[in-house]
Amino acid sequence: MSESKNTQAPLQGSQTDGSAAGGWPALSAVNKHLLHQHVLIKGNRTLLSMNKPGGFDCPSCSWPDPKKPHTFEYCENGAKALAWESTKKRVTPEFFARHTVSELATWSDHDLEAEGRISEPMRYDAASDKYLPVTWDQAFAEIGEELRNLSDPWKLELYTSGRTSNEAAFLYQLFGRLYGMANFPDCSNMCHETTSVALPESIGVGKGTTTLEDFENADAIFIIGQNPGTNSPRMMSELHAAARRGASIISFNPLREKALVRFAAPQDPRDMLSRGGVEISSQYHQVRIGGDMIALQGVCKAVIEADDTAQREGLPRVLDVPFIEEHTHGFEHYADYCRQLPWETIERHSGLTRQAMEEVAAVYKRSEGVICCWGMGVTQHMRGGDAMQQIINLLLLRGNIGKLGAGACPVRGHSNVQGDRTMGIYEKAGEPFLASMSKVFGFEASRKKGHAVAETCEALLRGEVEALISMGGNFFRAIPDTDVICPTVSRLRMTVLVNTKLNRSATVHGQKAFLLPCVARSELDMQNGVAQTITVEDSMSMVHGSTGMLEPASKHLISEVAIIAGIAKATLEPNPKVDWDSYVNNYALIRDKIEEVLPEQFHNFNQRIREPGGFHLPNEARERKWNTESGKANFLFPEGIYDEDDTPPGAEHLQLMTIRSHDQFNTTVYSNDDRYRDIYGDRMVVMLNPLDIERLGLKAGDYIEFQTALDPIMPRRAPGFKVIPYDVPQGCCAAYYPETNGLVPLANRDKRSNTPASKSIPVNLVRMSSEGVQVALERRGLIAAAS
């Protein structure tokens, strides 16, 4: 394996011991988590129906299902998600009678969710500071009354989690638009919104252009700012197969993630017998945090200069000139920019050597089909959109969009986050969608732009929000600047949390507050004696059905669709074109309405979801049709910004990136272990380069307080993090999300998409006194108070 590294001695995180991710430890972890939730037998049996035709879609990541699924078409973290939602543990009214909300607010994220499934609807009682049981009818009536009495429809915020089905998301945005507003903050606003905004500027669509068939035929796959072994483990099956057949896999990431080094597929008998697995990355480059953009420009520079040399020497061209001439705009300007970029500048800001980038370029030049994948390591930066567009520029140089074995592959994190956007969960939906909604449902949808997450947070700070409804998720734990924003929530007239389990957002509430528990993805959703099927859209634009099979955790649970309809009926005036009761009784009728609103994408919707694997939504860029202002794919780039970096090389402060552990999905923490990074029993850690530890006068095991180096007027602090020497580039450090969310100023975000720059936080590290350590340890697992 060729690699670029920034440390010399073997370190924790160097992944040099030859062990593989996956394999027997992954199988052991599956059974451990199923056993801990008391569903070992039921869980293993249920897993056989996950991600299969006629079964249910994994509630975790959004990786697509193959046309011919494996018998065991699930991964370790998908099994954890199933164990977590199918648990036998219950949060009953008796539990809430024993615990005040103030007490629950001191619990860790893990401990809150570990209590189990919420069994019936609850309403907050201020006098006792407890949640008390309430009937569904009473909850809907009170919520509806409160919404009817808001001073302005635009003071309602409707948040959506990526777990929400297409059918529920469609009704949810319909309810919001009928109510008279378009405030639809969505979990995508905090992760891949950068992709959704910047990708259309380049190629005309906000979705990826690849399918699984492309992975089967790619000569090279670039993994940029992504950790699939933890965040999208089923993707490892494609990378494992590609590596085994000889494709080149090149990874760019500040941390050496175990699964990208070596992986043993639990479904592969050869790997399970040998235990050695397959080497995944043929090159692994540890870029500085935020160095991806200029590193990619360095690769493009090497490719362009190789083409210049070929022209001078009369050799075959390196670039796909016919593609560039027919299908792209702005190439010459971009090529001139890359040619004049000094290698010294590129090396300084990327943390990579010229030789390393030329080695990447050599693979790119000889590969007929190249796929570029990226995750939040690219998108969650102040210039995330610019960085993502350099990925597209690289692909365009050799026509690697719109042909077999090639394409752009943003790997989204939640199982239907892409589908929710397709269904209209969007604060600035386009005119064709709004006109169609208005026509189909007999009203005039507002064309005014609403709020995404950043605007919702700003409105909270200004006191302009009166009610917030969360359709799943953990809004008040996932947002940036939590210590500044969350105290404002108590001023709200009402908060409503629709969820399966207890989490931090249940303890951050308005004057009135409701917990509304819903049926989970894996559970039977029976309406009038008929099992209902929902649909989801995966990360590659495949839409397929999902039908639960387990008995619901409680007889009091109802579906997301039923909850939305119940709130809507209690809030809105009757509309002869909107039959909420019929939609609840038969989800096929919702799909009929989706088809009416979006006929080009969803024609014969109900028929096509019966096809094994579902159907693929149209993607014009995949057909080399470019819906951009130029009518072509655009070479886009920023000029002259590198000396404005938040943390330039050699700065006194460090650049912090927030990460997930292997036992975590978004804000859900399954345990305090991170097996792939050899960290156990503790999430309050900071991973530091040994040279930085020495420079700062620290030592392994010391406790530090993070202090942001961005806002001297209101510095953010987070104490109680233990120093771990780790294989991370000098000047960079890493710590877990969401414990560090309070360090991310709301203003620290990508300027076009407003995605929080959670992967790029300038921080100072201050050693804590023994007294401070003691206080911090007592508060272990909580967000530290803002100063």
Image (spheres, grey):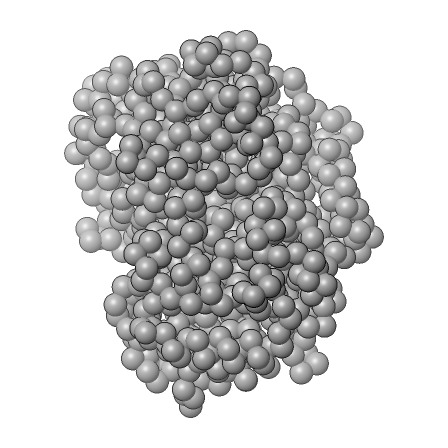
> Residue drawn 42% across and 67% down?
493
In the image, 745 versus 77, the foreground residue is 745
Most extreme residue toward the bottom, as rendered?
A: 576
The answer to whether 156 appears left or right of 8 in the picture is left
Residue 773 at x, y percent in the picture? 55, 26
Is 47 positioned to the left or the right of 439 in the image?
right
Q: Nearer the viewer, residue 470 or 635?
A: 470
Which residue occupies 43% across, 51% down?
Answer: 486
Does the rendering let one see residue 125?
A: yes
Q: Is residue 5 visible?
A: no
Instruction: Determine which quarter of the picture holds residue 137.
Output: bottom right
Which quadrant is the C terminus positioned in?
Answer: top left
Along the viewing direction, whichever of 247 and 513 lies nearer the viewer? 513
Task: Name the residue nearer the viewer: 643 or 556.
Answer: 556
Most distant residue in the front direction: 127
Which residue appears at 39% of the width and 55% of the height? 488
Residue 218, image x, y percentages: 49, 37
Residue 740 percent coordinates (x, y): 47, 37
Q: Residue at x 68, y 49 (%)?
A: 114
Q: Is residue 129 left or right of residue 632?
A: right
**Number of marks drawn:** 0
Q: Is 100 placed left or right of 706 in the picture?
A: right
| Residue 180 vertical position relative to residue 259 in the rendered view, above or below | below
Query: Is 15 rendered above or below residue 95?
Result: above
